[in-house]
Image: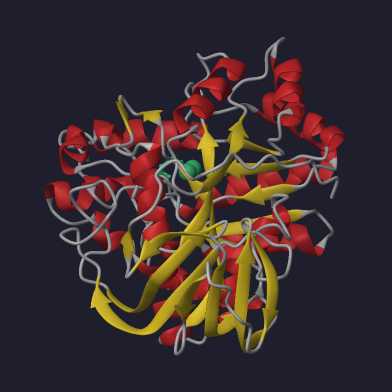
Amino acid sequence: MPLLIKNGEIVTADSRYIADIFVENETITRIGTNLEADADTEVIDATGKLIFPGFIDPHVHIYLPFMATFAKDSHTTGSQAALVGGTTTFIEMCCPSRNDDTLEGYNLWKAKAEGNSACDYTFHMSVTKYDEKTESQLREIVADGISSFKIFLSYKNFFGVDDNEMYQTMTLAKELGVIVTAHCENAELVGQLQQHLLAQGKTGSEWHEPSRPESVETEGTMRFATFLENTGATGYVVHLSCAGALAQAVAAKSRGVPIYVESVIPHFLLDKTYAEREGVEGAKHVMSPPLRDKKNQKVLWDALAQGFIDTVGTDHCPFDVAQKAMGADAFTAIPNGIPAIEDRVNLLYTYGVSRGTLDIHRFVDAASTKSAKLFGLFPRKGTIAVGSDADLVIYDPNYRGKISAATQTVNNDYNGFEGFEIDGKPDTVTVRGKVQVRGGKFIGDSSRGQLLRRKPQHF
Ligand code: URP
Ligand code: ZN
Ligand code: ZN
């Protein structure tokens, strides 16, 4: 059924105006004033609301075998929570371990998602080893429409690659025109520091951050940038958390290295004192790179405003309280991850735009448009324009509320942002023209989502 959204204030990465939007056959076909509805057209009055392009989360974990357990989400639960929070597309990390076959892993992740996602999705393909089969398998995966790789410089012997494997991955990525995303922490140092701390009886969650200090991430970022510089590949640092790492990325960029930066919402708003809380309360806030000293938050907000941080994702990775309690005797056994897929947009809007100084267009850019551009989805996604997919977020900027596990859609028994106030939330959300969220609740089709196949970009 055609859809007409009337009198909303359209806000994109570079424009802001009041207009009507007409949607037919999944795409936006007209934008103008006083557009007329046919008899069979659904009409939504968006007076007083903002209309944003569907938000894109460039970094989520949905299916994830990790740290002796599995992340809690299914594609059904994760995608519904995403939509309630205004995210209409996510990019999932497809993460077979070093012991798994890469192509089998890719097919497994695809099968998990297919027919089970309420929002659109694609994958970053993790390269967790580089053996005699890897090159041909990666070529096949890229030909299937996956134009971004992921490497981990941390998680030795599980997801982590060594320098040789990083070099091979980047060389192939350069040839194929594929962007390489990277978790940048020095695996060897993390392992040594963890053992050193545990040997001293330092077992609580407060020791997670000291086991992966800022210098460890700074070194990882510098090494990643140096390898990009010497292979010519284009890179994207995921979940950058601290000033030292940012300085390395900015320095590389200023000498011409094609490197982009993502930070994730926990690092903007939570600091390491959350992980220093007693018992499982601290464990709830363990992720990697860790929550940092609070002084880094202003650095991240400033860098976001200035565009040194390109995108804001979540690194959504839910484990429940019982799973977090697996690390009661050793912080190294706490499953790493904080869920945020439902809250990213509202938190960024509230603490960036509403209560901070973040320009609303930069907000849209960082939470949607820039990811669409970097990962081969623009202009199908990431903007509101004739011909683009009708992924639209009708946002109520007058809503006032608080984040709480008691009212969340996300499939978990706690929320790391419990009690945070929010100024605004999505009222209605469409995925390719179909209303999936109405009145702030998921009411849609759980199998609406499609795998978005992307072409290499040859940056
Ligand atoms: O703590 C985190 N970040 N968990 C998910 C895995 C990763 O490193 O992204
Ligand atoms: Zn990571
Ligand atoms: Zn991650």
Q: Position of residue 414 (x, y in %)?
A: 20, 53
Tell me which residue sits at (30%, 24%) in the image.
Answer: 68
Residue 292 shows up from this direction: no
Q: Position of residue 214 (x, y in %)?
A: 48, 54
Q: Where is residue 254 in the image (x, y as percent from the top left)?
A: 79, 64
Tell me which residue sits at (57%, 77%) in the image.
Answer: 37
- Is 187 or 197 nearer to us in this picture? 187
In this rendering, position of residue 250 left or right of residue 328? right
Q: Position of residue 435 (x, y in %)?
A: 45, 61
Tell me which residue sits at (22%, 64%) in the image.
Answer: 418
Where is 304 relative to 354, above or below?
A: above
Determine the residue located farthest toward the top in the rendered image: 132
Residue 137 shows up from this direction: yes
- Is 144 or 247 nearer to us in this picture? 144
Quarter of the image for residue 427 reads: bottom left
- Is 395 or 358 nearer to us in this picture? 395
Quarter of the image for residue 4 reads: bottom right
